[in-house]
Image: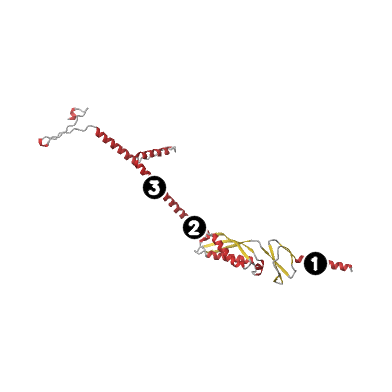
Amino acid sequence: MLQGLLTALAVTGIAAALYLAAAARVIRQYERGVVLRFGRLMGSVRGPGFTMVVPVVDRMHKVNMQIVTMPVPAQDGITRDNVTVRVDAVIYFKVVDPVDAIIRVEDYRFAVSQMAQTSLRSILGKSDLDELLSNREKLNQGLEVMMDSPAVEWGVTIDRVEIKDVSLPEGMKRSMARQAEADRERRSRLINADAELQASRKLAQAAAVMSEQPAALQLRLLQTVVAVAAEKNSTLVLPFPVELLRFLERAGDHHQNQAEQTSPGTATQMASPADGEPLVSARPPLAGVPEAVRS
């Protein structure tokens, strides 16, 4: 009798231990538990910690409440300006309602992934290539709004969407490189032309000042010689301005006029044509010349 009682107690203890092992559940801090009894939602969402369920009767689904980082596979698409591109992205989302994530959608992760791919293809067809390359922030916001509307019904909120990489065909890359090179060449020519315009204005002002003072040109020439000589060159090329020649020519003419005014002029005596005698010019005797030569 006692042995049978002990056996029954042992069997009961083992059964209780097995029941507890089957019924005990541990929910982590970042998880929530949704219990279905015979396929029907039971009670509220189970919080983190130790909880019990009825074995075989209840089935508990754990839902991760952390932010999930999901890469979106690269999608081939055609932009609005008919350029073929290949774009991949990454999406950040989290579950805000565990019941809707389990009840309303079969697999919320797969659903979010497919929705991200279709939304990415749709946004590619509505955007130009320039917007895709230079205005990604606007496209990211458009993707987030496009995906957030249906995801709310699934108990999921889209935290952020980022376009990672845009792959272009090789021909398009070469065309863009040529365009960028031509644009840089155009800007360099405009800068050079503007510099030439400013330099010409300054040179015109300098020429106006030097025209008032001809000696300034010679001083400037001497400064150029000093600057060239400072380089210790074996050959010195000295420019000779035309203005300096004109200055020397005017100075020479001035000295010649002064010499003519100060020297005695030649005395010329002319007979009257009425006398019938030829015109005779009286020149001063040439000093040092023999008489035979003078005659």
In the rendered image, residue 140, in percent from the top left (x then y), is placed at: 56, 61
Q: Earlier in the sequence, mark 2 or mark 3?
A: 2
Q: Contact (CB < 8 A) between labels 3 and 1?
A: no
Categorize mark 2 by other alpha carbons within 10 Å: few (<14), some (14-19), many (20+): few
Categorize mark 3 by other alpha carbons within 10 Å: few (<14), some (14-19), many (20+): few
In the rendered image, residue 166, in percent from the top left (x then y), is placed at: 55, 60
Instruction: Say which amino acid is labelled 3.
Output: Arg
Where on the picture, by quarter, is residue 32? bottom right
Q: Earlier in the sequence, mark 3 or mark 1?
A: 1
**Distance from Cα at disc 2 to Cα at disc 1:** 75 Å
Mark carried by residue 176: 2
Instruction: Say which amino acid is labelled 2.
Output: Met
Q: Which residue is mark 1?
A: 16
Where on the picture, by quarter, is residue 11? bottom right
SS under mark 1:
helix
Determine the residue positioned at 41% across, 48% down: 198
User: Which of the image's four quarters has the N terminus?
Assistant: bottom right
Determine the residue positioned at 81% across, 66% down: 14
